Each structure stands twice: as structure tokens, then as C-alpha cells.
Image: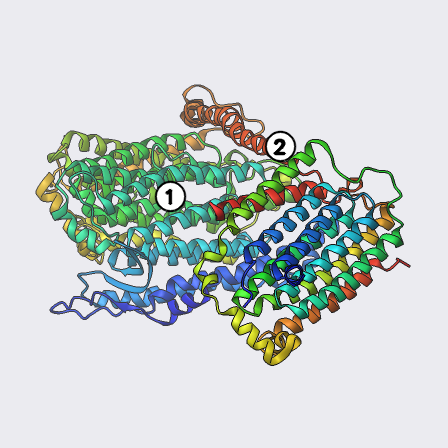
Amino acid sequence: MTLPLGYFALQEGHEIQAAAHGPAGEAFEPFLPGLVILLPLIGFLLNGALALAASRRSADSLRGGVELDFFEGGNRPLTHRLPTWIGPGVLGLAFLIVLVNFTRMLGADLHEPIIRHYWTWMNTGAFEVDVALQLDQLSMIMMMVVTGVGFLIHVFSVGYMGDDQGYPRYFAYLNLFVFFMLILVMGASFLLMFVGWEGVGFCSYILIGYWFTDREKADSGKKAFIVNRIGDLGFLAAMFLLFAGFGSFGGFGTLNFVEIFHDAPDALVYGGGIVTAITLCLLLGATGKSAQIPLYVWLPDAMAGPTPVSALIHAATMVTAGVYMVARTSVLFALAPVGGLSVALIGALTALFAATIGLAQYDIKRVLAYSTISQLGYMFVGVGVGAYAAGVFHLMTHAFFKALLFLGSGAVIHSMHHALHHTHNHADPQDMRNMGGLKKFMPITWITMWIATLAIAGIWPFAGFFSKDEIIWYAGARAAGTYGAWFTLIWIMALAAAMITAVYMTRLMIMTFHGKNRTGQEEAKHLHEAPWVMWVPLAILAALSIFGGWVNVPHAISDSFLGGYGLLPMSEWLHDWLHPIAGVATEIQATGAGEFSHHAPLFGGGELLWAVLSTVAALVVVLVTARIVGGFKYLPASESPAPKGFKKVLYMKYYIDELYDRIIVQPLIKASRFAWKVIDAGIVDGIANGLGNLARAFGWFGSLFQTGSVNTYALFLAIGVLVILGVVAF
Amino acid sequence: MLTGLLTEALVVSAFLFVVGTFGVLVRRNAIIMFLCIELQLNAVNLSFVALSRALGIEGQLYVFFVMTVAAAEAAVGLAIIISIFRHYETVNVNNFNLLKW
Amino acid sequence: MDTIFEFLFSRDFLFYVFSGVTIGSALAMVTRKNPVASLLFMVATLASLAGIYVLFEAHFLAAIQIIVYAGAIMVLFLFVIMLLNLGHDYQKDLKGGAWAIFAFVVAGAMAGVLARQYGGIEALPIYRDAHGPQVIDALLAEQGAVGVMAHPLFTDYVLAFELTGILLLVAIVGALALAKRRV
């Protein structure tokens, strides 16, 4: 393993495609892109070694009958001190390298992706896959998000996981996750992307089940893994179709992005069955990884993992892989209008559906989980309607404010946990009914989380306002073209979900930070603000949640009073930035399905009007909800009555888990039992045992000749000689 | 020139060999079985000698080697028989079936 | 009289006599119940075989057949028989009944196959045109009965010769180790 790794880092690979030299700009010169991937892997190996060392000590101690406490007597062993530097350190370095690359790419004029080829992974006849990285505008944005937000979350983890016995193991897993996530976004072929895809799935599994001694948490990890597996099937099928083709379509014979996307417009018939099948298969893969209907059920359970994990994997990066994938394969989705529509429709449905569930949850992380599902739905709407820049834009801003929300909730849970721990109270530290009035204990968390809430609710000028508004706008702008009725429906659903988002987020904030404190008198004394390593990342993310949206302000808004008449910098920067990636797809879509219109469906009106309307509406909703929820008298969880009526249906998540259990899991278990008892134990084992018994019978028959008497053997010997002689003679 | 009698000698050799084989098959006394094996060896020796007359001196050399091997075999075989006798107080092969299992 | 003597000492007649003695004593060896009798018939077989060897101009082999085989090895057998005091148990030595018949059939079939194989062997070109007798006779005249054997033994076949020496050594050590009374 070491040899190719060293090769990976030192050899900078050779470029297959030289950067196209634009007339004005300079060529893009990548700076150590291999090292970006390698650094987290090194971190994983170092932390992994420390984790093994620690677990060996712990196991030795357990064999001696004592459960080892690594922090006994206030000492931190080296195995629990080094990861503090290694874990966030490698991410910080990787982020710096990405930053260098990003600034270089900014200054360059890049029209074609840069492929860094390292070595041939496999070469079997017609099938050749290289280990090659693709550097272009899209992967650069993703790398920035993954390493940047990832670094902040790593830093936060130092505080959050500081008291955990498995500290080095945690950082090893987290580094491994980033490694795979970078492969996912930087891989230059579907197969390499799939490696990252599977890798992050595995890391998600081990991190959800991080506290594996808790049966329920370990099961949650399994659930995530298995549900993702269903989606992966779609991804695989899409890869097979792309490579080998089907029917009249002969396949591309390669899995490299550049070649496939270059050939696709000629090789595939617009709106044809093959490209639709490919996109629907990809969509199935995306619904698994990005937790969309019908495969969203694993994400709420994934909250069993440590909260920073929820922030990094299940909010900011891994779950957005599906969105990234659709944006990456935008050419294919543009060629298949039905595929694109399906993406948007599923996204809109999920956005609305998950948002309503979020209304009735009491677990702070569960609210955020459903919120994540809902926001991912928005991104799907964005990339589905063909506004790829808008989808990626929301992916980015969502990474900022949702990571902030999760980390903030982590800080709250951390504080609650400590407080409850001090008084040996066994109440649930994640249940919002047990919180209330935390703002005076944790002011920084309170302020930063409000910023994130305003961002996610879509209030001007926070990041979420621009990204979400753009998605909704583009959804409506498709209403004039093909499948217009569907897009109108999607537009309405997205609008409704936006309002519900404002409601449940405000409810979360009010229940957690405002009103009367419900933790109990003794516990309240131990509530405290998070340490600096936790609140500094919160503050940075809060800043990003405010300003992050300004990179892609639509012209219509930036030139109006909302944009300070051009004061907001960088109008439509991200849109232009991603043009080399999404341009082909946008053209195909404009030709095939019609241009984006400049009027909202049903009511008419331009972009600016609807932006103003939506932010005003969101603000009103926030204020009204704050008023209403603030008026509720919540009781601690143990004293609260069970939800009733429709509220109960929402609280029970529409009974979808129960439904899946009834129609999928139970029949599967029955079928498995049948396969076990009848087919395996009966038929297969029967045949195997029968053969065994037959051999045994033959053996018994043969043993009759083994008398042990020399004469018998001599006789058989003589017969044998006779036979040989006979053969020679006759 | 004494080339004749080759066929006759070979027939005698074959007969001796068959008698030896029969002896090994029907006798139960380990020592007599041993003697029968010696008889088989001598039958082969006879054919070697007869053929060497026609084909060259090497046949006689092989007889020489066979005799050496026979001597070695007799020494070891008899030693085994002695140690078996010490254990079982008999050399009748019916009384021991060590070759089983 | 001369013709009679000539006949009596002719190679053919002597061969048949020795062959008869060989076969007869071999049969007796196999069928005698008393091990000592069996052994003595075996000695007779070996001695008459030595006679046949002489007829085939293998003088040296005939000599060591008598000295080593009939003398040393058979005495070793006899020594063991006497040491173990065999021949006085009244257990049946010969296997009888169906087994004997079966063994007889197998042995008979083997004899039939061998006889068929040997019939007319002298007519084969390799034997008909063989120059062995002349060559061997010349060698015998030149080097003598011992020299004819010794020369190839110590030149072309010296490795095999040395190996038989080692084999004998191993056999001695093995026999000692096996027969030694456990202390």
C-alpha cells in the first residue's frame, strides 16, 4: 500500500488534457491535488494506529478485570492527546492546499476539466479504469466545502468528543470519511466516484454505530448501510448501462466523465428510453445517498451517531453526494427530461413531506435531520429543473448553516448532557421539552443558531435566502415549457415547504433557547457555554451563513434595493463559475424543453417581486410562529402527554417506518426464513448430507476389504499384478 | 555358444514365481511367507541370468544387487518378526492385523 | 557309454534335472507344514538354481548363491526359526478352502499369462541376433569369472555398488534396533 501512496503524493501525475488556453486568462496549474486526498488518509492511518494502541491497552486492562478509564486522575494519555492535532491538522493542511488551487483556478481561464492521471487501476480487455482526479469548477467547490466545513467540524469535535474514551478511533473514522468524500468529488470516472460513494457509506455506517455497545445505535448504522445498498444498486445499474449499453445503444465503453459527457449528446437520443433509464437508475442511487423519498428513512436514525458526525456526514457533505452526482451528470439529465422531472418531483415531495414531519418532533437532532432531508429535497429540485448552479449553490449554503445548526445543537446537547450527568438525571438531553431558556446560559450558541435559522428560513440577506429563492424561482420558470403543469406543482410545493421550514425552525429555537427553563433547578446550575474550540467554529460558520449567499446573487436582485443597488458583490458569480460544467446541459435543455421563463407561473410577476414576497412571508411566519410557540406551556418530556390526532401522525413520521416494516422487512424476513429452513436446511443441506452419507456408505463398503491381514493385501496385490500383466500381454 | 534353453529357463522362472506367489497367499507363518518372497526374488534372478546370456553381463550385475537387497531385507524382516513374536508370542499372521487403521 | 555320459552331462539334460529339482523342492517348500522342512527345501531350491546359473555361464553368481544365499541367509532364517522355537503350535498354517482355491486360480492365471508371454521369445530378433554369448565368452576367457563381474561393478556401476553397501549398513543398524530387547 505504501508504494502507490508515496507515488501518489510525490509524482504529481501527468496531465492528459492540457488546460485550454483562453485568450485572456492564464492556464490553470494545479497545486498538489493528490496530497489533498492523501492527507486525510495519512491522518486516518496515524489516528488508527493510536486507536489500536489505545484499544490494546484497554483490552489488556479488561482481561485483568478492570475497565480502563483513559482519563483517570485527570491525565490524558498520548493516544488521546495526539489526535487533537493530527485529526484537524491534516484537514487544515488539505484546506490550505485546496485554497491555493482555488485561487489559481480563479485567476485562470479554464474551459475543460483538468485530469490528473496517476496509475491504471485495472485493465481488462475493453474495460480500463485509471486512478485519475478531475479538477474543475464543480469539484473545486465541493473540495472547498468538504475540507473547509470538514476542518471546522473537526475542530469542534476536539471539544465535543474530548471526554470520549474512543477519541483516537473517532478521529480515525472522521479522517477516513473525508478521504473517501474527496475521492467521491475528485474522481474522474464513475467507478472512482463509486469507490468514494461506497467508502463514505461505510464510514457513515461505522460513525452512526460509533457507540456500538448501544444496540439501538448499532442497528441504526446497519439500517443506513442497508438502505444505501438499495440505492447503490441503481448506481451500479446506471454504470453498467453507460459502459455496455442496451439494445440499440452500444454503450460508451468507458466510465470516464470527460469522454462520456463529450459523446453523450451524439450517442444518446434526446428523451430516449436508454438515457431515461440511466438517469432514473442514477436517481435511485441519489435517493439512497441523499435520503430522498423513498429511501430517506435511514437519515433520521443516523442521528444516533455523535453530533459532529451528523453535521459533517449527514448534513454538510455525504448526503449532498446525490446532488453533486446529478450536477456532475447534468448532460445526461438534460438529455432525459423525464429523468430531470423525476429528480425535481421527488425533491419537491421530499422537501414538503420531511418538513411536515419536522413540525412535530421533539428530539432536537431529529428536527434537524428532517430539515436536512427537506433541504436536500430543495437541492434536488434545483438540479432537477436544470438550475445546476442553483442546486450546487444551495448545497454550499446549506453546508454552512446546517453544519452550524447541528454543531449548535451539539453544543446544546453537550451542555445538557453535562448538566444532567452532574445530577444523575436520566432525562433525554436531546429532547427539546427538557430544555427551554438556554439563551442566558449559552449566548454565543443562541446567537449563531438564530443566524442559521434565519438563513435556512430564507430571510434576506442571509445565505439561505439567495440559494433557496433561486431554486424556487427556477422551478417556477420551467412552468412555461415541457411538463409545465408538473413544474407548477413542484413550484407550489417548494413554496409551501419554505414556509413550513420557517415554522419548524422557529419552533426549535423557541423551545430550546426561549421561555422558561425546564431542565430543573439543580441542573440549570451546571449549564454552561461551550468551550472556545466549539464556539469558534460556530462563529465562523455563522459568518459564512450570513455572507455565503452573496456569491451568487441574481442580477435581478443585485441591481435592486435588496442588493443595495449593486452593493452586493459577485452577482451570479457561482452561476458563471459553473458555466463550463453546466453549460452544455443548459443548452440541451433550452433547445429540448424550452428556456427558463421570466415570469412566475399562475400569478405572473418577476424574480424580484417573488424574492421580496418570499422573504416578507418567511419573516412573518417566523414572527407569528415565535409568538404562538412562545405561548405554549411545554412540560419536561416525562410529564408531557403523548401527542394526539394529526399531531401524533406527524410525530410518528406518517408511520412510514412501520409501513416499510410491514410491506418490505417482514415479508423479507419470512422469505429469508423460508430460504433458510426449507431451501437451505432442507434441500441444499439435504443434498450435501446425502452426498456425504453416500460417500460414507462407499467408505464402509471399502473398509470391508481392509481386514488387516497380510494375506488379503497380498492377494489384492497379486490381482493387481495380474491385471497389469494382462494389459501388457493382450 | 550356449544360447539355447532361454525359453525353458524363463518358463521355470515363471513357475517359481507363481509358486512363490501362491505361497505368500496361502501360508500364515510369517517366516514361510518371507521364504516365499525370497523364492519370488530367485525366480526373477533366474530370468535375469538367462537373459544376460543373450544380452550382456548387466543382467548378472542386477542379480548381484538383488541378492544384496534380499540380504538386507531378510535381516530387517526377521528382526521385525522377532519383535512381533516378543509381543504376540506367535508369528501366525492371522493373530495380528496391525495394518488395519 | 560315451553317448550316455555325453547325454548325462549334456547341458540340456542337466538343465532339466536342475529345473526339476528346483520346481519340486519349491513346491515342497510351499506345502510343508514344518518350517524347518520348508527351509531345507528352500535351500535345495537355491542350490539347484545355482546349478542352472552355472549352465548359463554365471559362475560367480552360482558361487555366491551357494555361499551367501543358501549358506548365510538361509542359516539366518533357520536360526530365527529355532530361536523362536516354531513348528510346535498346532494352529493351521495353510489357509484352506475357498481361499486356497482363489489363490490357486490367481496364481494359475498369472502362470498362464507369463507362459504365453515367454512362448517363442527366442524367435524375437533381439534374442536371435544377439551377440551376447560370443562377447561374454570372450570376456570370460580374458578376465575370468570374477573379473567379468568385478570390472563393471567397480567402474560403471560403482555408485550402485557403494549404495548397496550403505543399504546393508542401514539394514544392520535397523535390524539391531528392532530386535534389541527393550531395556
Q: Which mark is residue A200?
A: none
Residue drawn at x 63%, y 43% is A421
User: What sort of colour scheme is used for the picture?
Assistant: rainbow
Amino acid, disc 2: Phe
The spot of residue A543 in percent (x, y) is: 36, 55
Closer to the camera in the image, A152 or A70: A70
User: Is residue C165 depicted above or below A412 in this figure?
Assistant: below
Residue drawn at x 34%, y 46% is A320
The spot of residue A379 in percent (x, y) is: 28, 43
> In the picture, residue A75 is in which quadrant?
bottom right
| Residue A440 visible, this orientation | no
- Which element type, helix, strand or loop, lies under badge 1? helix
User: Is residue B99 depicted above or below B59 in this figure?
Assistant: above
Q: Which mark is residue A453?
A: 1
Residue drawn at x 19%, y 61% is A112
Chain-order first, disc 2 or disc 1? 1
Which residue appears farthest toward the front when viewing the image?
Answer: C1
Q: How far apart, in angstroms, are the residues tagged by discs 2 and 1?
A: 82 Å
Residue drawn at x 79%, y 54% is B80
Amino acid, disc 1: Thr
**In the image, A324: left or right of A221?**
left
Provide the chain ID for the residue under circle 2: A
Closer to the camera in the image, A475 or C158: C158
Q: Which mark is residue A701?
A: 2
Q: Residues within 10 Å of mark 2 (few under 14, many from 20)?
A: few
